[in-house]
Image (spheres, rainbow, N blue to C red):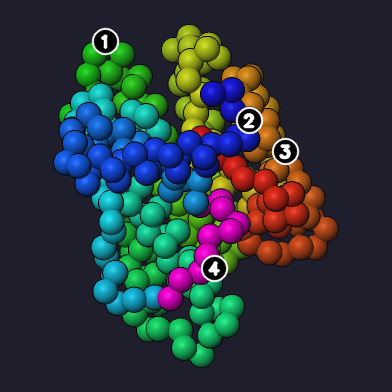
């Protein structure tokens, strides 16, 4: 609860076991399904920065499929409200994690046997990110109430930060891009995250209001080159004012990643060697 992240994976594993049992027994009501979706999304977020996920071979049978598809549960219940991401983007996140495990299986030991259909699946995810637009999301149908305008503005910037953050994540885990392209995506994430804080400030919100989800900022800021970092110092120092334990830990990891990158280490994602050396597990929410 206080954000130290010392044992979050134990709780996520417990919820996953309970969810499987409820479904076997046919007791998964709509309310329970929403809770299962939230816990499943947190597991997905945790897996994006896990350093111990086993590599797995690719199978054409799983192209475009998923054991659990994130859904829109309507006004007041979806991932849009809880974490500022849409089901479409959450499903793309799951696909990137799955594909990265497939890629590692072949890159590490069987590069000559890399399946063409796996490459096609990677391109399909890239196209999904490229073709996605905020206009395709039914946000105006989800938000209502006296603060609708502010809620919509915050939701759009949260979602756009996730979208560009996913592009950064894709290029560090699946198919590389040029440094100039990466710089663009990193800058876009920063712009949307700073705009969230600007909107809150203009609306008179204080730091007792829920903090911005840190995943897009963590993923993007780790890849920021020296000339891009001033804006990230500003954002992270502002986030510390929320006084949530994991924010301070994530910011420390980002700074350690920068030191390694500046020292000549070119490994991507930049957070990977930091977590590998420390043995830490992180949940960037």
- Which label number is shown at residue 4? 2
Q: Which residue is mark 1?
A: 146
Where is residue 34 shown, x and y percent of the image? Answer: 27, 34
Q: Which residue is mark 3?
A: 252
Name the residue nearer the viewer: 66 or 10.
10
Q: Secondary structure at mark 1?
A: loop
Q: Earlier in the sequence, mark 2 or mark 3?
A: 2
Name the residue nearer the viewer: 21 or 47.
21
Is 211 included in the stretch rendered in magenta? no
Of labels 1 and 2, the one closer to you: 2
Q: Earlier in the sequence, mark 4 or mark 2?
A: 2
The quadrant in which residue 115 appears is bottom left
Where is residue 35 shown, x and y percent of the image? Answer: 31, 33
In three-dimensional space, the C-alpha distance between marks 4 and 3, rounded to whole angstroms, equals 25 Å
Q: Which residue is mark 4?
A: 176
Where is residue 208 shown, x and y percent of the image? Answer: 52, 12
Name the residue nearer the viewer: 136 or 14.
14
Relative to 250, residue 199 above or below: above
Q: Is residue 189 visible?
A: no
Give the total of numbered labels: 4
What range is drawn magenta here? 48-57
Q: Secondary structure at mark 2?
A: loop
Q: Earlier in the sequence, mark 3 or mark 1?
A: 1
Asked if the residue at tag 3 contacts the one at tag 4, i.e. Cβ–Cβ closer than 8 Å, the answer is no
């Amino acid at each position: 609860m206080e954000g130290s992240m010392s044992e979050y994976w134990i709780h996520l594993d417990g919820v996953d076991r309970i969810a499987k049992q409820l479904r076997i027994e046919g007791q998964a009501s709509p309310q329970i399904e929403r809770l299962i979706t939230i816990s499943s999304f947190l597991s997905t977020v945790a897996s994006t920065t896990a350093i111990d996920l086993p590599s797995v071979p690719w199978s054409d049978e799983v192209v475009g499929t998923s054991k659990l598809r994130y859904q829109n549960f309507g006004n007041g219940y979806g991932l849009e409200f809880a974490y500022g991401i849409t089901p479409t983007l959450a499903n793309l996140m799951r696909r990137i994690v799955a594909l990265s495990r497939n890629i590692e299986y072949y890159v590490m030991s069987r590069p000559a046997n890399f399946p063409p259909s796996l490459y096609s699946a990677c391109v399909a995810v890239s196209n999904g990110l490229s073709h996605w637009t905020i206009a395709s999301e039914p946000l105006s149908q989800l938000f209502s109430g006296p603060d609708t305008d502010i809620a919509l503005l915050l939701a759009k910037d949260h979602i756009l930060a996730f979208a560009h953050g996913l592009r950064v994540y894709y290029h560090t885990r699946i198919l590389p891009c040029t440094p100039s392209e990466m710089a663009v995506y990193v800058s876009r994430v920063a712009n949307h995250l700073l705009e969230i804080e600007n909107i809150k400030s203009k609306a008179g919100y204080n730091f007792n209001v829920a903090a911005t989800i840190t995943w897009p900022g963590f993923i993007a800021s780790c890849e920021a080159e020296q000339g891009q970092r001033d804006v990230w110092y500003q954002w992270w120092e502002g986030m510390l004012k929320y006084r949530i334990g994991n924010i301070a830990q994530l910011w420390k990891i980002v700074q350690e990643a920068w030191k390694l990158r500046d020292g000549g280490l070119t490994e991507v994602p930049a957070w990977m060697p930091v977590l590998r050396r420390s043995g830490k597990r992180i949940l960037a929410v």
